[in-house]
Amino acid sequence: MIERSPLVWFNPADGYTVHKRMKRYIPLLLDTCALVALALWLGGLAVCWTVLAPTTRSIPSDGLAAAHDVLNRTVYRFSAIVELCGLVLVALQWVLRRRFQRSKSLFVVDGARTLVVFIALFCGEYGRYVIIPTLIKSDSAGAYTTLAILALVQAILLIGYMAVTGWLHSPGQAVSTQPARQAATGSAAPAKPHERGQKYR
């Protein structure tokens, strides 16, 4: 029996096991981060435009200017969160871009999902750097309407992104990738002994 040397502190088999566990849990951790970013983005839109905006617009005329200023400043601060959440989602989509490459159809759908995030992020950036500064300076009704439309477009895109994400991770789609996985690895059943003999006759 060969004893293990005390100088050998790393076992390659242990390293392989740790590597397999990391490959299993890292995508789950990244999916959780994406879910948090999506919840912050979509939840913030809902709070700003279904709770805060109607409340400030219904205030009497003597305090209307101050209420509009509060709304404009709040929306501007929230736009920074939108920018951060959008960048996080895009980065996570890029890191996990090879997840569905075994199935061509699922890979295309995942690419379309990334495009949806880009469009939603563009709407948020356009509102942050173009519309909101105009709204803060002039408090125009046109800028307010445009910003509300951009928020509605973002909400629709994010709900679509969430629906497609749930469809991609459904059990049926996970099963449909198994034949493609076998084709990609090129695995085939070993030939039987009598078939080997017939092959060389």
Image (cartoon, helix red, strand yellow):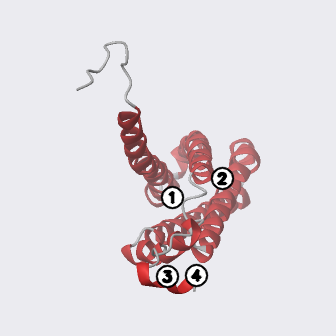
**Of label 2 and label 4, which has the lower sequence position?**
2
Q: Which residue is mark 1?
A: 49
Q: Which residue is mark 3?
A: 197
Q: Residue at x 43, y 40 (%)?
A: 19
Query: Does residue 168 lie above or below 99 as drawn?
Result: below
Give the residue type at disc 1: Trp
Give the residue type at disc 3: Gly
State the image coordinates of residue 9 (x, y, percent, origin top left): 36, 19
Give the residue type at disc 4: Tyr
Q: Are marks 2 and 3 in contact (CB under 8 Å)?
A: no
Q: Which residue is mark 2?
A: 124
Q: Which residue is mark 4?
A: 200
Q: Are marks 3 and 1 in contact (CB under 8 Å)?
A: no
- Of tags 3 and 1, which is closer to the observer? 3
**Of label 1 and label 4, which has the lower sequence position?**
1
Query: Does residue 201 lie above or below 180 as drawn?
Result: below
